[in-house]
Image: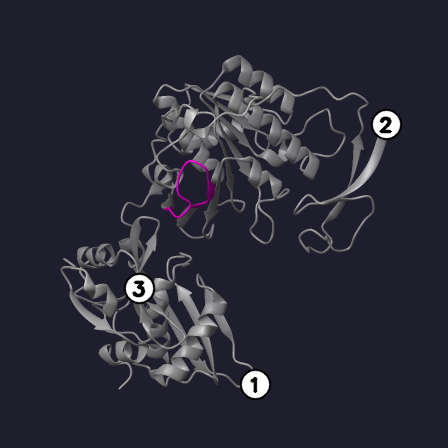
Amino acid sequence: MKNTVFVCQNCGHQSPRWLGRCPGCGEWNSFVEEERITRAKPKRRQAVVPENRRPVRLSDVAASSCERRSTGIGELDRVLGGGLVPGSLILIGGEPGIGKSTLTLQVCDRQAAAGAGVLYVSGEESAEQLRIRAARLGIKGDSISVLCTVGLEDIVEAAQSLQPGLLVVDSIQTVFSSTLSSAPGSVSQVRECTAELLRLAKARQMTTVLVGHVTKFGAIAGPKTLEHMVDTVLSFEGERFQQYRLIRAAKNRFGSTNEVGVFEMADTGLVEVTNPSRFFLSDRRENVSGSAVAATLEGTRPLLVEIQALAARTPYALPQRVANGFDARRLSMLLCVLERRAGVNTSGQDVFLNVAGGLRIQEPAADLGVVAAVASSVRDAAVRPDCVLIGEVGLGGEVRSVSRAADRLKEAARLGFGSAILPRRNLSKKLDAGVEVFPADTVRQALEILEVVR
């Protein structure tokens, strides 16, 4: 028996009729029509893990240690939490052309060199195209098995036959199951294929990597439940026309979600950037107004980034507030603090803020660097080039303490900076910094130390 339902492509919400706006996620024009087959007696699926019908005490459960396998790429291991976990399901999302297939092929080469069996499934490219890419990356591929198909049943059969340690599916939107009548890439197909690959990965202790497309808003395409089903969600960031690439973990059941991996796209593939602070500051110009260096944390790694600001008079009634790599609403808040607490007026000026290098800052410890860059541009006074700014800014104009100040100062000293401004409360602990430290209680005091405000 056939029936028709309407499914939201963004969140998977179902409706018997078409709706202009999804009641689940609020997205407009996201419902698509899908034709499904209702089975009279569905077969019971095999359990992913051994069933336990009787409750047991948590303290009586044996804790088994998880042995990870290194991917052979240090930056990727950092984001994953140490390496690949057997039986885990990993989803990698990113814009077209950003390097998802290049990264997965490089991981396959490292795993094959380490002695693990590898099966690479491609639903978008032919075997000849994969061979050309492998030759460009310097990969021989003697121990990598390639399967070019979009049939889920063919993938499961090949994986059960070869029993590889690593299975890569590029991409999950092209795979379809013959048991469903909907088109490949639809919500039901993506969800069903992911569920079947999840059962296969857990039953065979096979590490599975899924490559996913992204929507125009930057989210991974398919229902939101797709991200809930997998163990790890990796997000590929960066402009495909530039050389840098950033990898973040939006979800990780086996590690932290605060780490970031930095890569450089070269002719031979993605190359690790072992010193990202120097990478982000490589094109910095000194003694230019509107530029400041802030120390932020990405997971356990301290990073020094350049924050650029440009303020100019606007002929319009409503000035612009544009931020790239920084929260625009937080920028508006900091501009109000700058005007009321430090006397730097930006009400009649357009303010543009940019985090150089393509990094997106989410930590509030970069607030002081943002405020200094904006004030420097408004007053047309350059910030001291050897000074690093550290501190969160409150609504009262106070500079609030941050975590791991010593690590940030050591990173500044390692890159040759001679001074730093940080909250006074962070001086309560002994700091073996190697740089001259200037404590600041308020935003105005910090700007006076920088000689931006007198």
Please tell me which residue lies in front, 91 or 132.
91
- Picture layout, residue 38 above or below residue 44: below
Type of amino acid at the residue the image marks with label 2: Met
Residue 1 got which mark?
A: 2
| Residue 277 horizontal side relative to residue 187, left or right | left
Residue 317 got which mark?
A: 1
Structural distance between the alpha carbons of marks 2 and 3? 63 Å
Please give the name of the residue rendered at 40% of the width and 20% of the height, measured from the top-left corner.
Answer: 116
User: Which badge, 1 or 3, is on the more N-terminal residue?
Assistant: 3
Task: Check disc 2 and report its element: helix, strand or loop.
Answer: loop
Residue 37 got which mark?
A: none
Quarter occupied by the C terminus: bottom left
Please tell me which residue lies in front, 419 or 96.
419
The location of residue 363, given as percent across then percent down, is: 38, 59
Question: In the image, is residue 235 part of the stretch drawn in magenta?
Answer: no
Please tell me which residue lies in front, 265 or 37.
37
Residue 55 figure quarter = top right
Q: Which residue is label 3 attached to? A: 294
| Residue 446 horizontal side relative to residue 393, left or right | left
Q: Residues within 10 Å of mark 2 (few under 14, many from 20)?
A: few
The location of residue 326, given as percent across then percent down, is: 44, 63
User: Which badge, 2 or 1, is on the more N-terminal residue?
Assistant: 2
Please give the name of the residue rendered at 52% of the width and 24% of the height, measured from the top-left corner.
Answer: 201
| Residue 225 horizontal side relative to residue 321, left or right | right
Type of amino acid at the residue the image marks with label 1: Ala
Task: Check disc 1 and report its element: helix, strand or loop.
Answer: loop
Residue 445 figure quarter = bottom left
Q: Nearer the viewer, mark 2 or mark 3?
A: 2
- Picture layout, residue 16 above or below residue 291: above
Determine whether label 2 and label 1 are within 8 Å by CB: no
